Image (spheres, coloured by chain):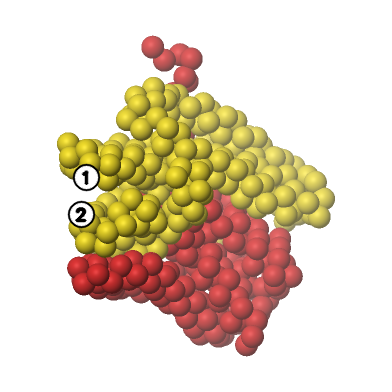
Chain colours: A red, B yellow
Amino acid sequence: MELMILLSLIGAVCSADITAFGQFMISRPIFCGPLFGYILGDIYTGLWLGLIVEMMWINAIPMGVSVPVDLTMMTILSVVWSCTAFQGCQEAAIFALALAIPFAYLYSEVDLGGRLFNTKIMHWIEKGIEQGKEYRITQGIFIGLFLFILRAGIAYFVFFIVGGIIFKQVYSFLPYEVVYGLKKAWYYLPVFGFGAVMYNFRNIKIPFLRK
Amino acid sequence: MAKRVSTRLFLRTFFIQSLWNFERLQNIGFLYVLYPVFKQLYPDKEKRKAVLLRHIGFFNTNPYMANIIFAMVINAEKSIADGDEKSVKKPEMIKAVMSGPIAAIGDSFFWGTWRPFVSFIAILLTILSVNIFDIFYIWIAPVAFIFLYNIVHLAFRYWILFVSFRLDEKMISLISKLEISYLGDMFRIIGLVIILTAIIFYFESFGFMPTMHLYFFDYTMPEALIFGIILLLSFLFGKFKPVIMFYCAILFSFILGYLEL
């Protein structure tokens, strides 16, 4: 249980990096995947899952008012579920990733609610400034950050436990053919990833040939 | 004031999006970053209140490039605090005029070019460490990713703050002279070479010949066909969302499993 709380806290800090604090890219799957893999004793699975997510969602970044799916949560959930239940099992790791995606989408909705609540905090700060309570600016920033980490942390904790149970139960009942297919997916999902990455180069220009 | 306030201000810029909201986006972050400066420039509480309310409107830009606006707004506010009444509308104008263009530059360079480029290096290092080098070196890829990204990102954020303080309005002409698209194209060409290398190493391990690993692409698949498949997938990624492509891949794996291929 203590480990789950600690992992939830680290996960929440990584998720906060997406928009709320710094943007040092510790939230990117290629970093947070192996980080959680290392903590749980299987850096290889963490790195490989991180690699798949990083490549397939290479262009997903929050810009303006768009809130893309939380790739950090997707990666961390799959690494934690697979490393705690079936460590070193590649087919289980791929199944964990497939199961983590709906949870990440669910969290995006929760995050949306949080951002709507931030508007209320913003109005509270505005009122404070009008009343001469300037300290509300600093308070508001830290309340916003605290609430972000709190809701992400709670979501991680609940998803680790609930999702972990679902993952173990469903995976145990998968037929042999499906498990065999998932084992194959471990090797060819990066190929799909290469496809996503190559999309980046669709309108490449050679600088020295430009007028 | 510059150096002492700037270091404090630089650390505060990491919080610019901590209270991101749908109504006015980064407005409170903007106030939080500049609050120590306003406190220093406007010791009178009533005057400061007016300034804070003046700046609480909509603000949105790329968080890395925002440092340019912070420095220019501070310079303008300094002039206002010194009694230059002509400059009263200048801070709002800077925010309104500069936010969009510098956001476009920041988004296109940092998130459209530099981050993918560093990711490509990490992807290549991962494939090399898993398949070619010893598995012991597996940690190199994530460490290299975070180190390379941040050494440029942090240095740029710090440098641009001080340069903008010094150059003020001249910063606009400096930015317009920067060949960001040229730089972006250069990084993309190098990135393409890195990714093609990664693809070759990947199929060297899992594709062109039987290996000690589980072999999937080992039989009857020529190199040209492999690259053709990747280009086809690239085309499909342009048409469909990554999540759809991911589940199609999983569905494909089930079919392969049932066919025992």
* Nearer-the-camera pick, B243 or B261: B243
Residue A211: % across, % down:
38, 12
Mark 1–mark 2 distance (CA, rounded to whole Å): 8 Å
Q: Badge 2 sits on which subunit?
A: B
Secondary element at image label 2: helix
Query: How many C-alpha atoms fall within 10 Å of the one at disc 2: few (<14), some, or many (≥20)?
Result: few
Tag 1 residue = B92
The answer to whether the residue labelled 1 contacts the one labelled 2, judged by CB atoms less than 8 Å apart, is yes
A122 vs B220, left or right, is left
Secondary element at image label 1: helix
Residue B43: % across, % down:
32, 57
Question: Mark 2: which amino acid?
Answer: Arg
Image point 49% across, 53% down: which residue?
B8
- Please tell me whether residue B75 is drawn above or below residue A102 in the rendered image: above
Image quadrant holding the N terminus of chain B, namely: top left
- Please tell me whether residue B247 is drawn above or below residue A11 in the rendered image: above
Residue A168 lies in quadrant: bottom right
N-term mark: 1 or 2:
2
Tag 2 residue = B54
Question: Mark 1: which amino acid?
Answer: Glu
B105 vs B11, left or right, is left
